[in-house]
Image (cartoon, coloured by chain):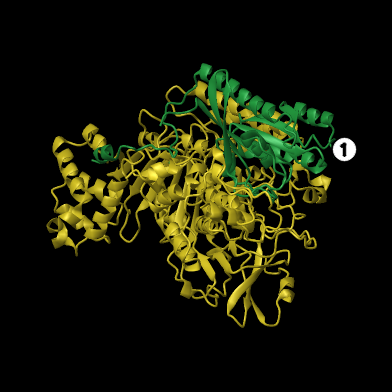
Chain colours: A green, B yellow
């Protein structure tokens, strides 16, 4: 199986229930929008491969599986994430206020160099807006992270958001590779990987 | 498969007619885990009807929850603690300190309000559940460094453990109880820290460890008390801005002074870097062909976790730690074995692989012990030791020849699948594994509530079956099946139950028990019993690349079935392997041993092997899951989960591969989730992105044999 991509980035979506995380995910991965998912069920992650600077990047974007509802997101969800989209709903002030709580959560459980971005979703519903764009921008500046208002429904800024996050991860990665700080001690084992195709070889290593 | 998926989608999320808001009572147990930082948001009420309610988030419960949700059941999964995993959990350093403190205090909650009894109807009976965890005993923790230097030091990025999140909770908090922001408190520690490192003789601290009170200052750090500190008050920018540079500082400091000497890590560094620790309460490894690996692959749960190979198997013989050659390459490269020994060992191990084909070789010894059998096999004493203690890992005095042969074969069969030893260790600790199954459950609609205590099971007298639970809000939640972890059962249910105990020790040390060219080793060492009647002690040493301890430290887990308290069982071994002195003027021999920086001992109740019939008065639709056992692998938990699942749902498959993300169908018309309606779904074809969606990765490994 030849690899069909150069990089694999694990991204997460985080934010209160009902802010449109799953819709953003569907808009980006399927270019579809469906108002009828009540809550997130059955969605583990979605994949879309994009191209940046001639490199194929497979974005593996994870959804919360509804575990944000009672604040029971597993620590395992955060492991190995390279980028996190913090999503609030511009028509729901509380979801905006909770962004800083989610950021604290990320600080506790995700790796310290994870790339973050804040999205104010549902910007098509301007008439119901409770959070001004300036407020969103200010919060993002306070944390030193990027910000966009998006609409999964009207397909506004969704592509831009994911491409921006991916590009930021890429930039960080390139910088790291230039620093050449590789730790030589055998990487982790992903047991889904097809590691030991060598069933005959296996007996050899065995003894 | 698609049909199933659709059904589970439809059933998974019941529509929520909002019941009246329950009283915002404080949850009974305020556990110290570093897990989930916020209480359930109570405005969002729980549905009151499920198919299966699971109480406890340990490994077997989590597997069952996942299996049930996967087969389309509506699952509610609760835990009274604020972290996942129960006694299977892993903690950051501060989280572990809070856990220790909580278990030492053992607050008595007996005067608890029993208002829920009013909710029980006349034709019903309540089976109360226990509200306190009585599974941990004899906790003793010791710090071998200068603790004063750690006074006021906080874990970088540590969060107060209680109400943070959820607007209602945050508002209740009085402004006066605000904790000083982390960054401010760190600075005094920073200044003190270096002097204390370099002043060795000053405080001739005896190895006689200090008791709990001494560690008090450090413990206060994460705001473990219920009343302490809603983090929402602390400026977020402080936390993010100030804590970031710290790791850099602390890493820079030791590396300067460290030419050859192992880097000196202070207690305050451990506290500050506490987040880098993921300390398992139960210490296990995954056999690479064990039931848990098979289940992880089969169910696709393996996509949620990463693993690291155990890199070496060690033996402790004649006071020395040495590496056991166990793969073919190891044997050939071994410098400690003579050519003759290499041949003997290869010959014997090759025989063990298919010993059943050669019954003549061992049948005369079936009634002897494996140790006696080994003596007849032309093996040198060191080879016998390796095979008995490090490869078969069986008892010298009790295990029969057949048991020894089986164990040896199991070890050999696990070699080479993922690496040169038979074992894998999950990155970030064993505590990740139950959570991975919880995620699968959630993906299939399972609802999760932590900090959610269950007061009682409600028994229907007429049918003799359990029909509901009453939770700590007095809410009644009905279901058909109930899974309860043993520690939630009350004393009256367990009067006839005999429990075993596990002795555990966790040490943070400054170097490996066996230094080699690579610092990043994951080692397993079996120390034979020091006296007759004791059990062998399993020692697992983890390096920082397992993401369970900070750089330049090692995390050492010791485990054995208890004969006395954990400290009495394990301290003799710790003294043999490690240097417990803090001064520099120790004998040369001591200097070669790793120094212990911090240690904790505790006994954990082992409820594995308890028959269901020993529990008094449990209805047939209530199933009990046991706490972790003392064995190295996880087979016991997986077997139990599968057995319980099959009893409940004999016709269903146990954890079939979960769908690839692209295969899930979303029904456009979904309005009334209860109605089962594949037929009226306009769109039932799988989504087209299946090709890219990690399809078949798991299957590939599963088929590999």
Q: Residue B415 appears at what percent x and percent y? A: 31, 43
Chain letter for mark 1, please.
A
Q: Residue B21 appears at what percent x and percent y? A: 79, 60
- A99 relative position to A60: left or right: right
Q: Give whichever of B513, B347 is nearer the camera.
A: B347
Q: Residue B583 appears at what percent x and percent y? A: 48, 35
Residue at 15% from the left image edge and 43% from the top image edge: B344
Residue at 49% from the left image edge and 38% from the top image edge: B694
- A92 relative position to B104: left or right: right
Q: Give whichever of A31, B137 is nearer the camera.
A: A31
Q: Quarter holding the C terminus of chain A? A: top left
Q: Give whichever of B443, B687 is nearer the camera.
A: B687
Residue at 49% from the left image edge and 75% from the top image edge: B496
Q: Quarter holding the N terminus of chain A? A: top left
Q: Residue B430 appears at what percent x and percent y? A: 49, 47
Q: Residue furthest right?
A: A127
Residue A38 visible, this orientation: yes
Q: SS class of the residue under badge 1?
A: helix
Q: Quadrant of residue B156?
A: top right
Q: Quadrant of residue A138?
A: top right
Looking at the image, residue B416 lies above or below residue B39: above
Looking at the image, residue A161 lies above or below residue A171: below
Neighbor class of circle 1 (other Cα within 10 Å; few <14, some 14-19, many 20+) is few
Residue B579 visible, this orientation: no
- Please give the residue where the numbered disc 1 appears in the rendered image: A127
- B520 relative position to A22: left or right: left
């Amino acid at each position: 199986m030849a690899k069909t991509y150069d990089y694999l980035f694990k991204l997460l979506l985080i934010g209160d229930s009902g802010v449109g995380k799953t819709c953003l995910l569907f808009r980006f991965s399927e270019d579809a929008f469906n108002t009828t998912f009540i809550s997130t069920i059955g969605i583990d992650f979605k994949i879309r491969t994009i191209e940046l600077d001639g490199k194929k990047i497979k974005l593996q974007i994870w959804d919360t599986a509804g575990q944000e509802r009672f604040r029971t997101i597993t620590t395992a969800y955060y492991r190995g994430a390279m980028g996190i989209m913090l999503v609030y709903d511009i028509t729901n002030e509380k979801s905006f206020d909770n962004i800083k709580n989610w950021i604290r959560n990320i600080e506790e459980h995700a790796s310290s160099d994870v790339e973050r971005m804040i999205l104010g979703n549902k910007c098509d519903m301007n008439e119901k807006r409770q959070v001004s764009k300036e407020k969103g921008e200010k919060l993002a500046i306070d944390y030193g992270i990027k910000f966009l208002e998006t609409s999964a429904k009207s397909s506004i800024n969704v592509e831009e958001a994911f491409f921006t996050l991916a590009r930021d991860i890429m930039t960080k990665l390139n910088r790291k590779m230039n620093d050449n700080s590789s730790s030589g001690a055998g990487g982790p084992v992903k047991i889904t990987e097809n590691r030991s195709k060598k069933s005959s070889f296996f007996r050899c290593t065995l003894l | 498969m698609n049909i199933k998926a659709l059904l589970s989608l439809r059933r998974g999320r019941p529509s929520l007619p909002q019941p009246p808001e329950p009283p915002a009572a404080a949850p009974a147990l305020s556990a110290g885990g570093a897990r989930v930082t916020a209480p359930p948001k109570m405005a969002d009420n729980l549905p009151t009807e499920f198919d299966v309610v699971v109480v406890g988030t340990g490994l077997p419960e989590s597997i069952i929850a996942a299996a049930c949700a996967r087969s389309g059941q509506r699952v509610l999964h609760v835990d009274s603690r604020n972290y996942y995993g129960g006694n299977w959990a892993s903690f950051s350093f501060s989280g572990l300190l809070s856990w220790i403190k909580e278990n030492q205090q053992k607050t008595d909650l007996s005067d608890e309000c029993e208002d829920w009894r009013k909710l029980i109807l006349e034709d019903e009976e309540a089976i109360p559940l226990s509200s306190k965890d009585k599974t941990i005993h004899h906790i003793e923790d010791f710090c071998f460094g200068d603790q004063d230097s750690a006074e006021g030091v906080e874990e970088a990025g540590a969060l107060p453990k209680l109400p943070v999140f959820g607007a209602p909770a945050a508002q209740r908090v009085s402004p006066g109880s605000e904790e000083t922001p982390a960054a401010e408190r760190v600075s005094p520690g920073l200044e003190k820290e270096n002097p204390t490192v370099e002043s060795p003789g000053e405080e001739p601290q005896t190895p006689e460890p200090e008791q709990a009170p001494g560690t008090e200052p450090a413990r206060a750090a994460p705001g473990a008390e219920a009343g302490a500190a809603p983090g929402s008050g602390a400026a977020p920018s402080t936390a993010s801005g100030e804590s970031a540079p710290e790791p850099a500082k602390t890493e820079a400091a030791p590396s300067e002074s460290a030419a050859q000497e192992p880097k000196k890590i202070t207690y305050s560094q451990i506290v500050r870097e506490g987040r880098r620790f993921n300390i398992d309460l139960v210490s296990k490894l995954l056999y690479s062909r064990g039931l848990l690996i098979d289940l992880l692959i089969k169910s696709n749960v393996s996509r949620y976790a990463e693993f690291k190979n155990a890199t070496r198997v060690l033996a402790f013989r004649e006071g020395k730690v040495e590496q056991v050659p166990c793969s073919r390459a190891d044997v050939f490269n071994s410098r400690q074995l003579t050519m003759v020994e290499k041949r003997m060992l290869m010959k014997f191990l090759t025989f063990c692989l298919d010993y059943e084909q050669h019954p003549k070789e061992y049948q005369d010894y079936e009634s002897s012990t494996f140790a006696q059998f080994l003596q007849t096999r032309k093996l040198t004493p060191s080879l016998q030791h390796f095979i008995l203690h490090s490869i078969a890992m069986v008892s010298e005095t009790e295990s029969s020849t057949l048991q020894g042969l089986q164990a040896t074969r199991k070890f050999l069969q696990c070699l080479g699948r993922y690496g040169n030893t038979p074992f894998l260790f999950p990155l970030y600790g064993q505590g990740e594994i139950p959570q991975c199954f919880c995620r699968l459950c959630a993906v299939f609609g399972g609802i999760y509530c932590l900090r959610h205590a269950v007061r009682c099971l409600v028994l229907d007298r007429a049918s003799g079956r359990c029909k509901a639970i009453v939770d700590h809000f007095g809410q009644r939640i009905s279901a058909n099946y109930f899974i309860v972890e043993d520690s939630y059962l009350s004393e009256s249910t367990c009067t006839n139950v005999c429990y075993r105990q596990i002795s555990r020790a966790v040490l943070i040390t400054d170097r490996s028990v066996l230094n080699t060219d690579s610092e990043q080793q994951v080692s397993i060492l079996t120390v034979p019993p020091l006296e007759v009647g004791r059990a062998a002690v399993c020692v697992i040493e983890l390096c920082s690349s397992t993401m369970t301890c900070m750089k330049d430290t090692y995390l050492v887990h010791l485990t054995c079935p208890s004969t006395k308290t954990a400290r009495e069982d394990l301290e003799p071994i710790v003294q043999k392997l490690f240097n417990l002195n803090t001064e520099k003027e120790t004998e040369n021999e001591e200097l070669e041993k790793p120094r212990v920086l911090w240690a904790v001992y505790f006994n954990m109740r082992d409820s594995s092997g308890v028959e269901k019939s020993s529990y008094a008065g449990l209805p047939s639709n209530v199933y009990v899951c046991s706490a972790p056992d003392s064995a190295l692998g996880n087979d016991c938990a997986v077997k139990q989960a599968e057995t319980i699942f099959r009893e409940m749902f004999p016709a269903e498959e146990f954890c079939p591969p979960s769908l690839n993300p692209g295969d899930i169908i979303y029904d456009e018309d979904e309005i009334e989730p209860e109605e089962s309606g594949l037929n009226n779904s306009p769109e039932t074809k799988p989504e087209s992105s299946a090709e890219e969606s990690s399809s078949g990765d798991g299957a590939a490994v599963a088929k590999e044999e």
